[in-house]
Image: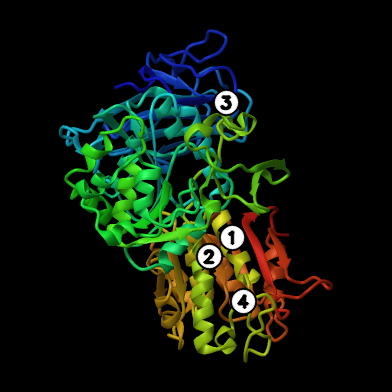
Amino acid sequence: MYLDTMTALQAQVGYGELGTHGHLGYEGKAVSVGQRAYGHALSTHPPARLLYYLGGRYATFRCHVALNDDVPPGLTQADFVVLADGRQVAAAPSVAAGEAPRLLEAEVAGADVLELVARTDRWDFCHAVWLDPQLTEDERRGPASTMLDCLGRVEASVPHARARARRCVVTVTSPGFERMLEDMLGSLVANGDCPEALLVVFALNANAECERIAAKFRARLIPCRPRAAISPMTKAVMYSAAHFVEAEQYLCLDADMLVLGSLRPVFEALEACPRGSILACREGMNKGLKRLGLALGQIYGGEEADAELLGMTPEESAYPFVVNDGLFAGGRAALDALDAVIRSMPKAVEWADAHPHYSWRNQFIFNLALARLDCGVELDPSYNLQLHVSDVRFEDGPAGLRAEWGGRPVRVVHFSGASKRRHPEWQGRFAGLPDPLLGSGGGDYYGAFVSALRAWVGRFGLKGLAWSFYGTADGETARVADPSVFPLLGLLHYLVRSNGCVRVLESGTARGVSTACIASALAHREGGRVVTFDPYPHAGREDLWATLPAAVRDCIEPRETGSLEGMAEALAAGEVYEAALLDSIHTEEHVWAEFELAARLVCEGGLILIHDACYRYGTVEGALRRIEAAGYGLVRLWTAEAGVREDDRLGLAVVENRRRQRAG
């Protein structure tokens, strides 16, 4: 399958139009590279981004990338990047004009969305082209399997490779509700404060617009076929979400909601509740309702005989927590139990379909399951403010759209029931944004490192931080002016992370504090590694590393050798790094010797950091002057004579590993 024969879900190019079938997309010109014309090509003048819906059908993506022949050689260059479901799977950096086409191959098995990105820092005439872009079908895929939800409303496709995540947010949509879906997902991404959560959309009769919206938000789309008339009862597929997505925690939202506050407390509350708990908000209708048995008649049009038909016990009838299922959350065990209990109610489907005027009877079955499991935990109503019985005051200010009810901020506004047309002036605000901020970027491993560090200091005391970035000049203890974020270590973490480092070397491990900090900046990257040299295994080091998340701990490679010996061996082995931290012996000759080796090990333009740059009992300054005399750019940090001092006059030097001038 040639990709240029498929319709892009989204296409953004920096100049002209997206060119397909061998066209450049402007001035009637054609794609030509190396004097060869291409009948299948995508022309994407950077900055460009293309999205295609794959639906998990393909195994590989293959193409060549180049700059078109009409660009003079060497005039410009482009980076080509391929992403599958937001994860980079292939890249061709710095492809220059006049260069022969470069091959790109990527594994995309199971991916829903293919993303092609072209970037440049030399915009003019950057005619970036993807040549013969082809997708190969996944021959290992057999016929798609399907499963009915627990109320038999929907037949949903079971993914060949079920998505896995620690946390996921689930919703359901159908034709006619695409705009609400886009608005809800947009508000969730903007305000929900859970960027690490996998987004899942159960799509009934999925159309191209639904696919576009799912791709826009990198959501996993699960195609569904209705087995009954589409109605509010269709949302019962969310009760069975654990059959389709493997997660530790699930948060299920109706598509007719606006998220205006953080949902992170809901996920965190799951960790504090007993296993099997399901969190939800009380039903807004008939707020004085204290028993599920009363709700049967007052909300769902039921009678006493219905209670007997459904096997409702007196204890279940007296269950005091009657919920609205527009928002609910639970762990995997809870959703498995919910699904199993509903499937075990032999008359549930028959009763739900018996009264067409009550198309929300699924919600009573949900409530009955909670009562039967005795697992309901009440959330504050601000997490599901139902507009069919309440109203809110909206306000649009510098912080964005906000809502207030009873003098309190509302986190989730639910356009429930007949309220879907209320407040039209505030609907669609998030749907119209073409480029939402997506993804978690690998997660907050710095936060995990700081948590581990606090626990470690609680065991070893401040003295454990001696000879770290927070050590005092006498080498006896440490001083931490701001223990809330440890800004000195935060600088180290984000220098390494923001510079795109994958491999970092360190001389002088000591108790491994800076090693752990660097590892936290690399753990989200494929092949992330910090190689640290120290001939002595210092006390407490392994204790700190053992408390780090496995992904961070696995990035650390200690080598029990002196820094000069270890770096010489690494050089002989052809190792390459993007950064180095020199922090072992603080004499001019030793630091200069380390720097000479580091300059050969670290890539051109990489970072070389030198700690204790102004340590009064060392002679590091002499090495810094030699580095500057050799033509390297160098900046001394933490030396200001005013302000609040965070370190104890130890200092840090940052060297760009690129000569600016020749020595002498």
- The residue located at (50%, 70%) in the rendering is 449
Residue ID for mark 2 = 446
Distance Cα–Cα, label 2 vs label 1: 9 Å
Please say whether residue 118 is visible from this viewpoint. Answer: no
Q: Secondary structure at mark 4?
A: loop
Between 290 and 231, which is closer to the camera in this rendering?
290
Amino acid marked by disc 1: Tyr
Amino acid marked by disc 3: Cys
Residue ID for mark 3 = 126
Q: Earlier in the sequence, mark 2 or mark 3?
A: 3
Q: Earlier in the sequence, mark 1 or mark 3?
A: 3
Between 537 and 550, which is closer to the camera in this rendering?
550
Q: Is residue 415 above or below residue 368?
A: above
Please say whether residue 330 is visible from this viewpoint. Answer: yes
Label drawn at residue 469? 4
Q: Quadrant of the N terminus?
A: top left
Label drawn at residue 205? none
Rendered location of residue 654, percent (x, y): 66, 64
Q: Secondary structure at mark 1?
A: helix
- Of marks 4 and 3, the one in the foreground: 4
384 left or right of 311? right
Q: Is residue 240 above or below residue 183?
A: below
Residue ID for mark 1 = 494
- Of marks 2 and 3, the one in the foreground: 2
Distance Cα–Cα, label 2 vs label 3: 38 Å
- Of marks 1 and 3, the one in the foreground: 1
- The residue located at (40%, 29%) in the rendering is 211
